[in-house]
Image (cartoon, rainbow, N blue to C red):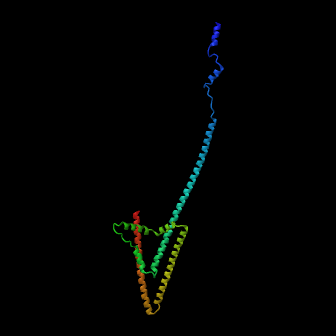
Amino acid sequence: MSGIGNKRVAGEPGTSVPPEKKTAVEDSGTTVETIKLGGVSSTEDSDIRTLQTKNRKLAEMLDQRQSIEDELREHIEKLERRQATDDASLLIVNRYWSQFDENIRIILKRYDLEQSLGDLLTERKALVVPEPEPDSDSNQERKDDRDRGEGQEPAFSFLATLASSSSEEIESQLQERVESSRRAVSQIVTVYDKLWEKVELLSRRLNGGDNLIVEEAVQELNSFLTQENMRLQELTDLLQEKHHTMSQEVLDRKGEW
């Protein structure tokens, strides 16, 4: 009995497994070795810190650029305001300068004894604009061109010329205009001296005591006064027509607005 039991115990399978097979069973995948990722995690953190640093630098650069743009924009606005103020000042100065030249021209027309009445009549005719033919497009276009060309104020045309000129050309044009005004003033002085000499001569002849000379002086004075009266009348008509033309242009422009 005991021998049979001992044989069964010795012959049971699985009770004594060889060491090689046991090791193979343990290595069949039941045990998983842990993989450490510490190196990858530290690289990602380094990249994130680098990107954050770059973003901060970019933000600082953008803030600096925005500040520079704001300063430039403010500087441009100041320059634009200064330019507008300078343009307005130049326009005012040039307008009064043009009016000064016009007043001198009128005084010369009034007192220049060497200027004939034909010059005044020619200028009066220049103010009369011929009426265009009805239903004529070409005439209307010519009228529009004339209005745009002649209707512009001299101040604007002179300033436009200066705006398109170099600094040397501006200086030359201003010097030329100053010289023109100076010559006109000198001409007024010359005209006044001639008129004064004529009046003095007539006064001496009238007070000379010789009846024949006095009579001739009276006739000459009457002729002179008649001529001056005609000149003054023509000049008055010229100024009235010019005022009417300018008033009509102002009304037309207001109608366009």
Residue 240 visible? The answer is no
**In this rendering, would 51 be left or right of 236?**
right
- Vertical position of residue 195 compared to residue 19: above or below: below
In the orientation shown, which residue stands out farthest toward the left?
Answer: 134
Lateral position of residue 89 relative to residue 238, left or right: right
On screen, residue 195 above or below 10: below
Nearer-the-camera pick, 153 or 218: 153
Q: Quadrant of the N terminus?
A: top right
Q: Residue 57: where, in percent of width, then height?
A: 60, 48
Q: Can the viewer see residue 187?
A: yes
Q: Nearer the viewer, residue 27 or 147?
A: 27
Number of numbered callouts drawn: 0
Residue 144: x and y in percent read 40, 66
Q: Position of residue 42 (x, y in %)?
A: 63, 38
- The quarter of the picture where residue 130 lies is bottom left
88 over 227 or under it: above or below: above
Q: Tell me which residue sits at (62%, 39%) in the image.
A: 43
Which one is nearer the viewer's eye here, 96 or 137? 137
Question: In which quadrant of the rendered image does the C terminus lie?
Answer: bottom left
Instruction: Classify 253 as above or below 34.
Output: below
Q: Residue at x 55, y 67 (%)?
A: 167
Percent position of residue 256, x then y = 40, 63
Q: Quadrant of residue 36?
A: top right
Q: Residue at x 41, y 77 (%)?
A: 122
Residue at (52% x, 63% y) in the render: 83
Front residue (pair 142, 192): 142
Q: Residue furthest top?
A: 1
